[in-house]
Amino acid sequence: MNRRNFLTGLGAATVAGAWATSRATEPRRSAPSPTVPSRFPNIVLRTQDDKAVRFYDDLIRDRIVVINMIYTRCQGLCPAMTSNLLRVQHLLGDRVGRDVFFYSVSLKPEQDTPQALKEFATAHHVGPGWLFLTGKPEDIELLRKKLGFTYDDPVEDADKSNHVGMVRMGNEPYMRWAACPGLSAPTWLAKDILLELDGPTRSAVKTS
Amino acid sequence: MNPRSTPPHPSKARLKAIEDAARNRRELIAAQLSRREMMKMGLLTAGGMLVAKAGLSARAASADPGSSNLVSPPTTPFKVPLPVSTPIDLRTGSSHTVSLLSPAPTVAPNVAAGEGRQIPQQALLAYPPEYAYEVHEREAQHSFHPELPVQTIWGFDGQCPGPTYLASYGSPVLMRMHNDLPPLDQRPIGGFGRSETSTHLHNGHTPSESDGNPMDFFGPGKFYDQHYPNIAAGGDRRERMSTLWYHDHRVGFTSQNVYKGLTGFYLLFDEDDCGDETRGFRLPSGAFDVPLTLADKVFDSDGNIYFDLFNLDGILGDKFTVNGAIQPFFEVHPRKYRFRLLNTGPSRFDELYLTDLDQPGTSIPLHQISADGNLLPTPLAGDHVRISVAERCDVLVDFSQFKPGARIYLENRLEQKNGRGPTGKILPAGEGDLVMRFDVTLPRVEDASLIPAKLRDFPDVNLAQVVNTRTWRFERRNGAWTINGKSFDPDEVRASVKQGTAEIWIFQNNSGGWQHPVLVHFEEFLILSRNGQPAALNDHRKDMARLEFNEEVKMFMRFRNFHGKYPMHCHNVVHEDHDMMLRWDIVA
């Protein structure tokens, strides 16, 4: 590219917009509908029953899920969030484990053995359809970042006692993801989940 | 590399950015640009660093490597003419009269005909609609730039942004919203968006059931009649508004659906602001009254708009679109224009200047004539305006001050690096983001418009009417946004106000290092003080209260004419979707 062409093409440009006008003339594929498995690393996790599961293949794929992050020795947010989600589980009844799956992923996998998670879940009287998950620290860290349980400030992000208390609600087949604070009213969390569970059938029925 | 289909690799996006930067430098060297030229074009800082303008999500470098630092593909700036669509005139004529609507609008939801509304119209009979329009929300193909692929967006009537409506006081409008978006049991093309919608007319004086409440969404295949009475609050002429906009407001998914294209303008006129520059306020009108929808976006390496579904803090784009085109140019006559500026976000705050890159040190005058939906008492002469997400601002610019052929840029000079809000630093002229370019290339034409000495008076503040004072603290705890310690619950009425009364509301930003543009639906308020100081002329009558770091804003609120549920929320739409919102009700 010579100077003249560069200036002509550039006008007065922003940097990201300015580069390599030659690249821009290459034919581009028109919008495919991309699949997004890279968002969900297929790492191996262990459940509170010490069963090995793959995150994408076994937990996320073709499912509607509710995900948060906790650690069992947490003295503040985690027990409160877990109690709150338990109320949501009760409101949803036996649809949990059938139509929607709850996952609590350990933020401190080095402490949270499957047995520790089992004790935590038992102490909270957690029902079926709700897995507590641990794994290799580096895998969990990757998952945490992928799912956006992060702060942009690295100092804040490193403080596990002040971790993100959001609950992610996702519908993998339709790529619908939202998040609510984990301490939201359980009635609203349950309603929001039901909107996802029943939304497609609700709207597909066109009133004539 | 498509960040959504690439296996996880922590450094891949960074590597790509580094590669790009290296290539950029080589090209700059090959192009033999001088340091001065590069600075002039905003490519180089005074310190000699190449300006970094990556597409940022607030999740920064530590977060997902595939998307957070996504850099959009290159596009040649100022290659596309500014799109300006022909407005839909709901003020006169016979093409949009309500009698053409079939079935006719009903007070009760017309469920039999497929209406998704669930609440009866409270004011349809009191303000019978004169004009009507049937708009169809649908998937469509759109070009943001000729160097990017034509791609799928969601738009009102398939347009991005949607149609501009012209309405007038005294002529109520019935807007029939058809949701023709793809069914919910389909993965949306592009991988984001939820095809249930609730269109909010921001910030119409609208009955609750026609307001586009976040909970009043309806699904594909249905329609919803919204009734816009087009009356001034309390019948007070001074409460009239001018520049309104509309957008989807579906709870939890507003940011995705707005980003996907569901926005548009709704302009209100009266005998003063009349759309005729020989009468009334004599503001530039017709082709010289131009709405500008600003939206920043990120595109993936295939050139398709990308939305980071897992972002909590705010999304910043590295491509600046105006009326749906990336960095367009607009040929103008050497005369006065009215530009209606709207920032649709998702999360960026703009401080907009006019820049002549040949004389970047020269301040270019403009006149601000409105703040959000309303005209100011007098035009405010200056050289910039600041608008956060959802704020509007009308400005008058006189291009006769420039020599023929001049190229004048609309430049955002407010530095912002993440979803926390701007740093507050104003970048030097030419080093900000050049949003669009005005080319003074068209011939001289008649200009009957004026910069009027006087516009619309503010309504009075009558503290004797105040029956209650409420304080709202905007906070953050464990990454969750709260107002007075609570997040959104659509079934909890956080404030119940009596119709016809007035209250003082105090907003406090206690979220530590975050800024929030806060919207209260329904009536424009009057800001009494900001941090204890009297509000500025352009910060007094507003529908958005911009809360910068640690600020406190005190306002006078009134609740007239209608009743029902309304929300208050942060309009950084990413914060909003993560429940920085509450419900308050007006009870009759």
Image (tube, coloured by chain):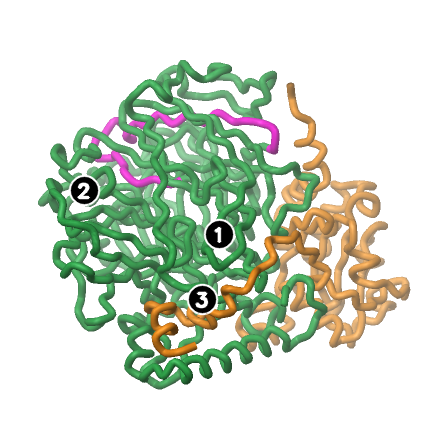
Crowding around mark 2 (Cα neighbors within 10 Å: few <14, some 14 to 19, many 20+) is: many
Please name whichever residue, B576 or B12, is drawn nearer the observer in this view of the structure. B12
Q: Which callout, 2 or 3, points at the residue further toward the start of the chain?
A: 2
Q: Amino acid at mark 2?
A: Pro
The verdict on a common chain for dots 1 and 3 is yes
The label number, if any, that marks residue B573 in the structure image: 1
> Does the CB distance between marks 1 and 3 fall below 8 Å?
no
Q: Chain of mark 2?
A: B
Vertical position of residue B312 compared to residue B71: above or below: above
- Tell me the mark number nearer the camera, choosing from 1 and 3: 1
Vertical position of residue B327 compared to residue A71: above or below: above
Q: Picture coordinates of residue A75 (x, y %)?
A: 69, 67
- Picture quarter with the N terminus of chain B: bottom right
Q: Which callout, 1 or 2, points at the residue further toward the start of the chain?
A: 2
The label number, if any, that marks residue B284 in the structure image: 2
Q: Secondary structure at mark 3?
A: loop
Measure the alpha-carbon separation of dots 1 and 3.
19 Å
Q: Colour of chain A?
A: orange
Q: Is residue B569 magenta?
A: no
Measure the alpha-carbon separation of dots 2 and 3.
43 Å
Q: Secondary structure at mark 2?
A: loop
Q: Picture coordinates of residue B417 (x, y %)?
A: 44, 69
- Tell me the mark number nearer the camera, choosing from 2 and 3: 2
Residue at x 82% of width, y 53% of height: A125
Question: Count the marks: how many?
Answer: 3
The residue where tag 3 is placed is B512
Q: Amino acid at mark 1?
A: Val
Vertical position of residue B176 compared to residue B286: above or below: above
**Which residues lie in the magenta part?**
B219-245
Q: Colour of chain B?
A: green
